[in-house]
Image (cartoon, rainbow, N blue to C red):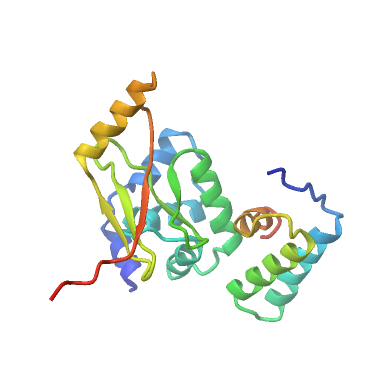
Amino acid sequence: MTVEGEALNEIGVLSRIESLCAEKGLRMTEPRRVIARVLSVSEDHPDAEELYDRVKAIDPSISMATIYRTMKLFEEMSIVSKRDFGDGRARYEKQSGPDDHHHHMIDVQSGEVIEFYNQELEDLKKRIAAELGFELVDHHLELFGIRRKKQH
Amino acid sequence: MVQPICPVSSACRQAVTRAYTTLKDSGADERVAFEAAEIVYAWHHPEVPRQRVPFVIADWLP
């Protein structure tokens, strides 16, 4: 069994994304269910092609077109977020809630993506919004950089 | 950006679906067939941003 297959077996009755789909009244076809489960166990930010590779290992009948259609639908229904890390590929992650809110630091040389949370930054953003007469309801931030060489 | 409307009978749409189904029928890998369809679409519509292309043709392909 593949790594994805083993991970999928560990999921309870409904994955987080499946639950969100149910909450939003989305009809769950088998391809949607497989894609939702693969996304739910993904620790990284897969693009559509990476998703396809993982989904294909579970159900080879699912096409690239189905992946793109499903991701468009999930994005439109705010079930996943689409991210652009500057490499020309749309990447996806589970919609984060108040408990797992985070941002991304992207290494432009290696493509490595690091998730981070900074309370000071969160407070600053709320303050800026307030000063402009807004209540902050949503935001996301991607930082791009090159790793500094270690000093010897 | 306004996306071009391509009815079923349009040349671009027929070319895209033909490229994809022909490749698939001849045993090509799904990714190869899909990428070929993307290239065909981009040739017809160079004005559409490259990132948008797979989402557009996904509505036309099985």
**Image coords of residue B54 (percent x, y):** 62, 59
Which quadrant: the N terminus of chain B? Answer: top right
Q: Is residue A75 visible?
A: yes
Query: Which residue appears at 18% of the width and 72% of the height?
Result: A150
Q: Quadrant of the C terminus of chain B?
A: bottom right
The residue located at (30%, 28%) in the rendering is A126
Q: List the single residue furthest toward the top.
A: A133
Residue A77 on image: x %, y %: 50, 38
B48 and B7: which is toward the camera: B48
Mark count: 0
> Could you tell me residue A69's position as x and y percent?
58, 52
Q: Quadrant of residue B26?
A: bottom right
In the depicted view, which residue is nearer to us: B6 or A138? Answer: A138
**Quadrant of res B53:** bottom right
Q: Nearer the viewer, residue A19 or A46?
A: A46
**Residue A27 in view:** no
The reply, left or right, for residue B7 in relation to residue A107 is right
**Residue at (44% x, 40% y) in the render:** A21
Q: Is residue B19 depicted above or below A97 in this figure?
A: below
Q: Relative to residue A38, is residue A56 depicted above or below? A: below
Q: In the picture provided, is A35 more to the left or to the right than A63?
A: left
Q: Residue A135: which quarter of the image?
A: top left
Residue in the foreground of this view, choosing between A1 and A55 = A55
| Residue drawn at point x = 28 percent, y = 41 percent | A101
Q: Is residue A71 left or right of residue A92?
A: right
